[in-house]
Amino acid sequence: MDSAEVSLRGLALGDAFGETWFRTTRTPRDLAPGQWHWTDDTAMALGVFRVLKRCGSINQDALAVEFAAEYTRDPHRNYGAAMHDVLQAIHNGASWRSVAPRQFNGLGSWGNGAAMRVAPIGAYFPLDQVAEQASRSAVVTHAHPEAAAGAVAVAVATALSISGVTGADMLPEVISRVPNGLVREGLRRAERIGFEVDPRNAAGSLGNGSKLSAPDTVPFVVWSAARHLDDLVEALWDTVVAGGDTDTNAAMVAGIIAPRTGLNSVPKEWWHAAEPLPL
């Protein structure tokens, strides 16, 4: 659980840091005053972490209960419209098996919400188990295959990060474990871009999460994490400069990198500003 907790703490810090970059006129590298509040990204990642700690694997029924309970405690964490419907219905007694697939006219959500919370799974399981467990966690709320593919990509990237993979090798290794589809195509584009490109230009090609979908978010996130795999703080700065869904992007990047680097490199003023976790 140690690596999973470090991933969670990194995710929450990235989430809170990234949230401060919405609707701001600050110049780059100018920190917002505290307190930085985390969002639904962290609220749902807490549910994942608690189920891992209690069950040792992704028990989907237990995970649905955790998600709904955390939502009910505080529904004002910037949950997406579809998740308000899903989590309220689960809280009211409906099964996730019927609620999640009915979203978006029966297609299920392909949003980035399954990927934003999944990094602790990649930090917890051996690499050969990560994809299955990440996919199981995704479908509890996001039934579309692209949402599951996004979750698999981020969880696998986290596991690879811990394994000591180089940044140059991360993208091809992730691609080899992600199912065919739009997320995988985006990761292939990210691999071709290389790391010398300005993050804003990379996001222009890959997406920056502004569409809130897994295909529009995950390729840039994995690219950004791989680009600064040994420097968490620099990765966060370069992630938020690309704009878009900055809290979710930064949460995923930090969740991927933190179990590799640890958290000691994060400036103390960041920790003082960030909302603590209820662990």
Image: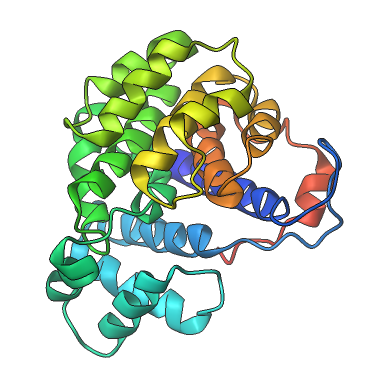
Q: Judge left or right: residue 81 versus residue 74.
A: left
**Rendering colour mode:** rainbow
Residue 58 lies in what quarter of the image? bottom left
Task: Give the percent coordinates (x, y) of residue 81.
Answer: 41, 73
Residue drawn where x is 31% and y is 41% of the image = 150
Above or below for 91 versus 227: below
Residue 262 lies in what quarter of the image? top right
User: Can you name the residue that lies furthest to the bottom here?
Assistant: 92
Residue 6 in sight here: no
Q: Judge left or right: residue 138 versus residue 101.
A: right
Residue 66 in sight here: yes
Along the viewing direction, whichever of 58 and 37 lies nearer the viewer: 37
Number of numbered tags placed on the structure image = 0
Above or below for 151 versus 202: below
What is the quadrant of the C terminus in the image?
bottom right
Residue drawn where x is 54% and y is 69% of the image = 78
Along the viewing direction, whichever of 262 and 14 lies nearer the viewer: 14
What is the quadrant of the N terminus in the image?
top left
Q: Judge left or right: residue 123 versus residue 42.
A: left
Task: Give the percent coordinates (x, y) of residue 167.
Answer: 48, 14
Residue drawn where x is 23% and y is 69% of the image = 103
Residue 99 lies in what quarter of the image? bottom left
Task: Give the percent coordinates (x, y) of residue 131.
Answer: 22, 37
Above or below for 33 versus 96: above
Task: Give the percent coordinates (x, y) of residue 218.
Answer: 40, 37
Q: Judge left or right: residue 11 versus residue 21.
A: left
